[in-house]
Image (cartoon, rainbow, N blue to C red):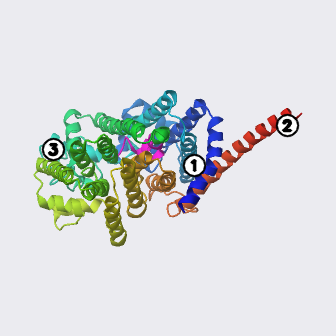
């Protein structure tokens, strides 16, 4: 099987190399621009569609002239059919251009001009999310509300919800699912949120932009770290690593809007420290990632088990001790005892008002059979570590892709951010392809769930939410194959023409 895979890779390499020879930096910039235009349609047009304007944050649109101008403009889709059509077209365009970018950068020399081009393009497109209307994501002001419970009102967000402070200017914009309940976010994020709330003032729009800016900076830091780690770990795939994170539609759309961007950044920072052999620094960094969201806990377990397997007992003890100490300090900040930690680790629903925080979020590790397989896989991957850092990263990518595919709600596309980050560093074609296909399906399902509502339903003829992969992914594949075939035939035609001229 390995021989056939190698043969397939070898046979496809002339096609990819031929395609790369025919494309310049201008073509890559054009593709990045196409991705940017498609993402802008989500950031500035779909986010003002009728279903999104039902949100409490819609009243903030009138407070900023640019948002007000967009909302009153003719480009915002106003019917369910128009919204669905724009979602489908924008998704196919974004992922089609993104897929071609991955192909054009695969094993391409990472020249400084191309690296700068990809880094700048990613930064510009990602920054659009900071400026999008407040209806783009309902979560940001929920984050702000819980941050202000601690920073402004001196309360404990794990005991009191934002609705308890109805005089707070942010309180009317916190969603009903969260306002009356204690926070369900883990303490690493809550610490950051409290810090932002302390410096953000009382302007709701100002706080919204501040939180988005912080999440954008975390996403940007992840991009820069991926560039540096790939330069050391897999220099032949450096451009692809940068493109896989920096121009992923999921990263561009959700990086400046979701706490998962913080989780991903600390994960990549921990990998960077492991690569330069700084495990004592990597352990608390990894803990910060895990205690933003538990999705990266299996990756930490692989690393720790690997250290035990290699008989690095002192390193394993130091890593484990620093990890536990970091987590303990975070919980001590909010007076959280063992019960709160156990509730977070087990995602257990306890009885009584104080336990209602777990109801608002669907647990990730809740399916017994897939979770058991995950546990066995984590132990097996950890046991097969041999000190090779690329093997470790690929093990992270495998477990991340598995958890994303089988244990993640399909409309939570942002849960893929950590997986996208480690797959970008893996330099493995099949992992990259699997993540690309999974990202396309999740992205489309999440978009249909977000931009439709009971009052403004989207057309159900295609049943997109249930069968996203049967619609967008074949379309992307057909479009990519058509482009590649046309370019290949063009190249063969030119070569054939040259040979005929020489013969004559």
User: What separation in Å lies between label 1 and label 3 (alpha carbons)?
Assistant: 43 Å
**Percent x, y of residue 270:** 29, 44
**Percent x, y of residue 499:** 81, 37
For the point 41% across and 64% down, the residue is 406
Residue 25 is drawn in which quadrant? top right
Residue range of the region highlighted in magenta in the rendering: 243-258
The reply, left or right, for residue 19 in relation to residue 417 is right
Q: Is residue 470 above or below residue 239?
A: below
Q: Which mark is residue 500?
A: 2
The residue to which callout 1 is attached is 92
Of the two numbered discs 1 and 2 on the same chain, state the one appearing first in sequence.
1
Q: Secondary structure at mark 1?
A: helix
**Percent x, y of residue 353:** 17, 62
Q: Secondary structure at mark 2?
A: helix
Of the two numbered discs 2 and 3 on the same chain, state the one appearing first in sequence.
3
Front residue of this view, candidates 283 and 485: 283
């Amino acid at each position: 099987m390995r021989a056939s895979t190698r043969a397939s890779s070898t046979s496809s390499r002339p096609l990819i190399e031929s395609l790369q020879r025919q494309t310049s930096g201008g073509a890559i910039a054009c593709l990045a621009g196409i991705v940017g235009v498609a993402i802008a349609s989500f950031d500035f047009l779909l986010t003002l569609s009728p279903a999104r304007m039902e949100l409490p944050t819609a009243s903030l649109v009138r407070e900023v002239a640019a948002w007000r101008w967009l909302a009153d403009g003719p480009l915002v889709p106003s019917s369910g059919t128009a919204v669905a059509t724009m979602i489908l077209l924008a998704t196919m365009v974004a992922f089609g251009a993104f897929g071609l970018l991955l192909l054009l950068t695969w094993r391409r020399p990472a020249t400084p001009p191309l690296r700068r081009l990809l880094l700048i393009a990613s930064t510009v497109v990602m920054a659009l999310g900071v400026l999008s209307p407040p209806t783009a994501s309902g979560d940001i002001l929920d984050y702000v509300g819980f941050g202000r419970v601690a920073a402004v009102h001196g309360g404990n967000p794990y005991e009191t919800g934002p609705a308890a402070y109805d005089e707070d200017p942010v309180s009317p914009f916190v969603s009903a699912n969260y306002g009356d309940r204690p926070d369900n976010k883990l303490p690493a994020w809550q610490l950051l949120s409290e810090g932002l709330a302390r410096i953000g003032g009382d302007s709701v729009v100002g706080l919204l932009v501040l939180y988005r800016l912080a999440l954008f900076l975390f996403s940007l830091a992840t991009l820069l770290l991926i560039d540096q780690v790939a330069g050391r770990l897999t220099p032949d795939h450096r451009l692809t690593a940068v493109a896989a994170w920096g121009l992923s539609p999921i990263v561009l759309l959700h990086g400046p809007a979701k706490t998962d961007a913080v989780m991903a950044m600390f994960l990549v920072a921990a990998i960077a420290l492991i690569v330069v052999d700084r495990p004592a620094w990597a352990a608390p960094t990894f803990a910060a990632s895990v205690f933003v969201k538990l999705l990266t806990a299996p990756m930490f377990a692989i690393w720790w088990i690997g250290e035990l397997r290699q008989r690095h007992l002192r390193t394993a003890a130091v890593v484990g001790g620093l990890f536990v100490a970091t987590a303990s300090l975070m919980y001590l900040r909010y007076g959280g005892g063992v019960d709160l930690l156990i509730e977070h680790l087990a995602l257990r629903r306890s009885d009584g008002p104080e336990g209602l925080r777990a109801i608002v979020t669907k647990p990730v590790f809740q399916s017994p059979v897939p979770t058991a397989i995950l546990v066995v896989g984590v132990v097996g991957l950890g046991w097969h570590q041999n000190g090779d850092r690329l093997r470790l990263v690929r093990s992270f990518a495998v477990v991340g892709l598995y958890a994303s595919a089988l244990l993640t709600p399909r409309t939570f596309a942002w849960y893929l951010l950590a997986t996208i980050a480690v797959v970008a560093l893996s330099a493995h074609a099949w992992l990259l392809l699997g993540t690309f296909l999974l990202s396309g399906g999740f992205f489309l399902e999440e978009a249909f769930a977000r931009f439709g509502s009971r009052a403004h339903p989207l057309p159900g003829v295609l049943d997109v939410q249930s069968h996203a992969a049967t619609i967008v992914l074949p379309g992307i594949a057909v479009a990519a194959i058509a482009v590649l075939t046309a370019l290949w035939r063009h190249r063969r035609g030119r070569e054939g023409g040259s040979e005929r001229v020489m013969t004559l």
